[in-house]
Image (cartoon, rainbow, N blue to C red):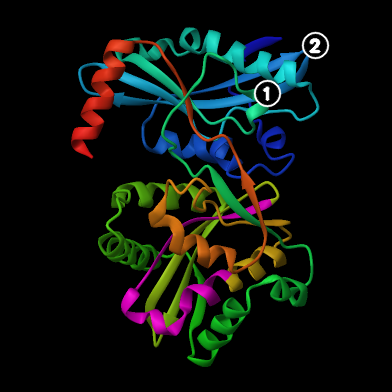
Amino acid sequence: MELILSNENFDDFVGARFISSNFLQSSIWQDFLSAQKKNFWQLAITDNGKLIATCLLYENRLPYGKSYLYAPKGPIISDEISVEQKKGAVELILSKVRDVTVETKKYQEIFFKLEPETESSLVSELKKSPDIHPRDTLVLDIEPDEKNLLGQMHQKTRYNIALARRRDVEIKFGGTNEDLDDFLQLTKKTAERNQITVHRDDYYRLLWQTLKNRDAGEIVLAKVKDKTVAANIVVRFGEAMTYLHGASDYEMRNYMAPHLLQWETIKQAKRLGYKIYDFWGIAPSDGSKPKWEGISRFKRGFGGREIESPGTYEMVYDQNWYRIYKIAKKIFR
């Protein structure tokens, strides 16, 4: 096996088969990282000249000249190689990653986080850490016709979709600055109601501009009498459309707008030729995310199948600074 630092576009390899959230390892995400002015690197592993793995990782800077490295939902490893080769690819990345990220020497790395697709690629050097992205997800195969898709849903979900229509909820596929402003306003309301932390406005603005530039996403709005009552941002990559961010107006909950919003987005994904709608994130079975139970019930109402992943793992380079980092994180939380 050989590891190289590459500027090539590996989207065909990354998107060749469905892996939940693989857009986080795509050139779309590279553009988004560039927009945030983050240092990032794309590694490629070949075996006898054939590409078998890629890994997009980036630097997150910390105080006191420290940093950590992170590969979101990566590495992406071919499913045509053996378990031993998968472990070998991960071990090669772990052994070489600090050599290729020479730009971060100004910001000394404390640890490296990554999110392997399956447990079969885990190696002894990696230790479990708190998850950053959702560990488990719900995906809906949308190749069946609409009648079959409706038949997979929970009866209550079908009822709420019909109820939203009767109450004249309108769905708009948008992308204007006003649409984004509506999304941001609802996001703040949702965060305050649920006591959760969301990204800053500039993060969402950069994300949307990136998706817009790449024609890789949409803002979808649910409106009642010209008032936006629910809004989602979806990403298109590979075989899937992914529900990435969403928000709604709790005071308008009786309109059931989020149900119709999801259904119309699923239909749009189907019209555009995508095979999978990824709801991206449900509460894990171990009960570690009690605040996710409500949104998970909502998503499960649409049917589909659940996919589990190992979650986030890390390799620690500096134990002393790592302990300081963990303590500081607890204090700020």
Residue shown at 30% from the left, 54% from the top: 196
Which amino acid, by three-letter code, is at mark 1? Ala
Q: Is residue 59 above or below residue 107?
A: below
**Of residues 4 and 163, the one drawn nearer to the viewer in this rendering:** 163
User: Residue 51, how many percent across, how many down?
Assistant: 74, 21
Residue segment shown in magenta: 240-262
The answer for how far apart the CA atoms under marks 1 and 2 are is 13 Å
Residue found 73% across the figure and 22% down from its top: 52
Residue 53: assigned label: 1
Tell me the residue at 69%/40% (across/down).
Answer: 15
For the N terminus, which image quadrant?
top right
Q: Earlier in the sequence, mark 1 or mark 2?
A: 2
Across and down, in percent, residue 60 comes to 35, 27
The quadrant in which the C terminus is found is top left
Tag 2: amino acid: Asn
Q: Are marks 1 and 2 in contact (CB under 8 Å)?
A: no
Q: Which mark is residue 267?
A: none
Give the vertical position of 225 relative to 205 (above or below): below
Picture residue at 55% right of the left edge, 63% below the top: 299
Percent across and percent down for residue 42 are 55, 23
For disc 2, the marked residue is: 48
